[in-house]
């Protein structure tokens, strides 16, 4: 288990050094430094709660709420950059997970135990 955890730590370090992760960190920093985006994110959160409440009651969200939500999502280039960076990083993690799964399947089929 110790070797596996060491390799997981190394994998995390490599991912942390990737261009996609660095871009995500920069985008998050820009969002944190932009008061307008922080306000926008707070409002988006309020609207999401409103939509969730309506759906829990079995109601459709009000059209005005949906329109405001859609407008806010498009309102800020800083926010759009964060969304794009998060999407790119998520793709990297998805590919990493696919390779881990392939490795696990390969390891499960192999009777050979590799040295640590």
Image: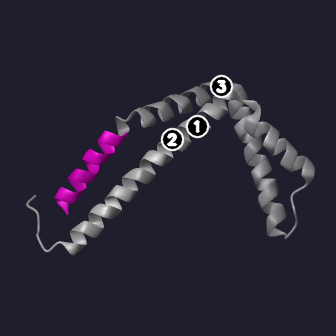
Q: Residues within 10 Å of mark 1 (few under 14, many from 20)?
A: some
Q: Disc 2 versus disc 1: distance between alpha carbons?
A: 6 Å
Indicate the secondary structure of the residue bearing disc 1. Answer: helix
In the rendered image, residue 6 lying in the magenta stretch gets the answer yes
Q: Which residue is mark 2?
A: 88
Q: Residues within 10 Å of mark 3 (few under 14, many from 20)?
A: some
Residue drawn where x is 43% and y is 49% of the image: 93
Q: How many marks?
A: 3
Q: Which quadrant is home to the C terminus?
A: bottom left
Q: Which residue is mark 1?
A: 84
Q: Disc 2 versus disc 3: distance between alpha carbons?
A: 22 Å
- Dot 1 or dot 3: first in sequence order is 3
Q: Which residue is mark 3?
A: 34
Residue 62 position (above or below residue 30): below
In the rendered image, residue 91 lying in the magenta stretch gets the answer no
Task: Please identify the quarter of the rendering in which residue 17 is found.
Answer: top left
């Amino acid at each position: 288990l110790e070797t596996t955890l060491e390799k997981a730590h190394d994998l995390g370090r490599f991912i942390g050094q990737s261009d996609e992760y660095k871009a995500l960190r920069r985008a998050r920093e820009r969002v944190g430094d932009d008061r307008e985006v922080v306000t926008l994110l707070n409002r988006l959160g309020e609207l999401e709660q409103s939509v969730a409440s309506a759906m829990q009651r079995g109601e459709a969200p009000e059209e005005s709420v949906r329109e405001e939500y859609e407008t806010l999502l498009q309102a800020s280039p800083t926010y759009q950059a964060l969304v794009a960076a998060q999407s790119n990083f998520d793709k990297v993690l998805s590919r990493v997970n696919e390779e881990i799964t392939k490795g696990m399947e390969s390891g499960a089929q192999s009777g050979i135990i590799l040295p640590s």
